[in-house]
Amino acid sequence: MPENFIKELEWRGMIHDMMPGTEDALNKGVSAGYIGFDPTADSLHVGSLVQIMILVHFQRAGHKPYALVGGATGMVGDPSGKSQERNLLDSETLNHNVACVRKQLEKFLDFDCGENSAEMVNNYDWFKDMSFLEFIRDVGKHISVNYMMAKDSVKSRLETGMSFTEFSYQLVQGYDFYHLNKHKNCIVQLGGSDQWGNIVTGTELIRRKGGGEAYAVTTPLIKKADGTKFGKTESGNVWLDAEKTSPYKFYQFWINATDSDAENYIKIFTLKSKEEIESLIEEHKAAPHLRVLQKALAADITTRVHSEDALNTAIAATEALFAKSIDGMLSLSADVLLDAFEGVPQVTVSKDELTEGIGIIDALAARGGFLNSNSEARREIKGNAISVNRVKVKEDYTITSEDLLHDKFVLLSKGKKKNYLLILE
């Protein structure tokens, strides 16, 4: 188990900014610290994993982690990194989201391990009974408008416009730190680099209002090697909830990482030691085509977010896509297979059509345009390139209901990699 939290983050490349004195303060003994999580959705996504891992390392170093879920601030909206004001949520939706986020955090943090057990707090609990006049009297008077205007999250929005609601956000988040410092003895707030301004507003409020000890650590913004945003795919966010992003798609997100990204991600998103990671990197460089880093990364994270069974199913589905026989597919559910075949050309067929039978030429060319013409279909069949459910077929082959896999679809393929589905409507 790592003894020095800051040193652990440094070699993993997980520190962007740090307030002077933070490392010395944390090395004095068990300390409490927190990270805030946005409850505007009922699931966290892979972008949230960076902050989750920070709390995991914090707890592993012997400290007490607090996960603050912003039941109050979720009603306001953090302007950091945003180009426009976001929609505000009602309390019922927020409460549901908070409960879902807690379930996901419990997969990573130990909430029952004695002195440094993780705790979850909701800032709605201390804001719900505070009046506006009380807030501006007891909090607002300690931070000047000049100080607030100097923050990047404010300056970047001055030209396009910013509501008072958003402008006041840093005061609200600053008070969170003050409250947890006073009532939970939290001496450090952790977060993404875009949160630095809000976090130091908290340390300033603690210094001016209570004279307490407070520090800050932020992580760098994770980007892909090509400069694009981490955690985004063509279909949107990669969620931790299996209903929003299936374990198969989750696994594919990591397995498809570039070599340079995988080398970076394995330090950030796994708990593997420095020695283990260096060994994996060397092994990968010796035979990049085996994708050792990507497989180790995807296996580790998929298991922790979902389960070992989910990992095995994702691997089986991946292998089934390129298997020479249909056997592997029959061992998987129809939903998993259809998920794996997302993006593959598909066309629906009726039960009556399958009862009568569909000629292979018709299935290949006329229906979904898998091949451009009947002549191309005949040419590919004569070249022994066409298979139905991984079995090579001739020009006189007729597809019937007996060809259905899981009573739902028929797989047509050209060669090893080009696939096409007939799906029973």
Image: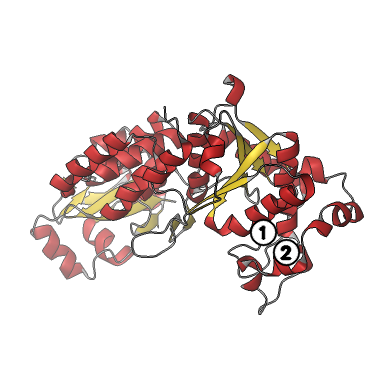
Disc with the residue nearer the chain's start (1 vs 2): 1
Query: Quick check: 72 left or right of 37?
Result: right
Up/down of 411 relative to 79, above or below:
above
Up/down of 309 relative to 280, above or below:
above
Q: Amino acid at mark 1?
A: Asp
Instruction: Write the residue at 34% across / 50% down.
Output: 264
Quadrant of res 226:
bottom left
Query: Quick check: 97 left or right of 104?
Result: right
Instruction: Write the residue at 41% across / 42% down.
Output: 269
Quadrant of res 389:
top left
The residue tagged 2 is 166
Q: Amino acid at mark 2?
A: Glu
The residue tagged 1 is 78
Estimate the x, y position of residue 249 in percent, counting from the top left. 40, 47
Identify the disc placed on residue 260: none
Query: Quick check: 422 left or right of 247?
Result: left
Up/down of 161 relative to 306, above or below:
below
- How many badges with numbers are in the image? 2
Are circles 1 and 2 on residues that touch, CB within 8 Å?
A: yes
Q: Quadrant of the N terminus?
A: top left
Quadrant of res 284:
top left
**Extreme residue in the top direction:** 114
Estimate the x, y position of residue 288 in percent, counting from the top left. 17, 49
**Extreme residue in the bottom direction:** 159
Q: Secondary structure at mark 1?
A: loop
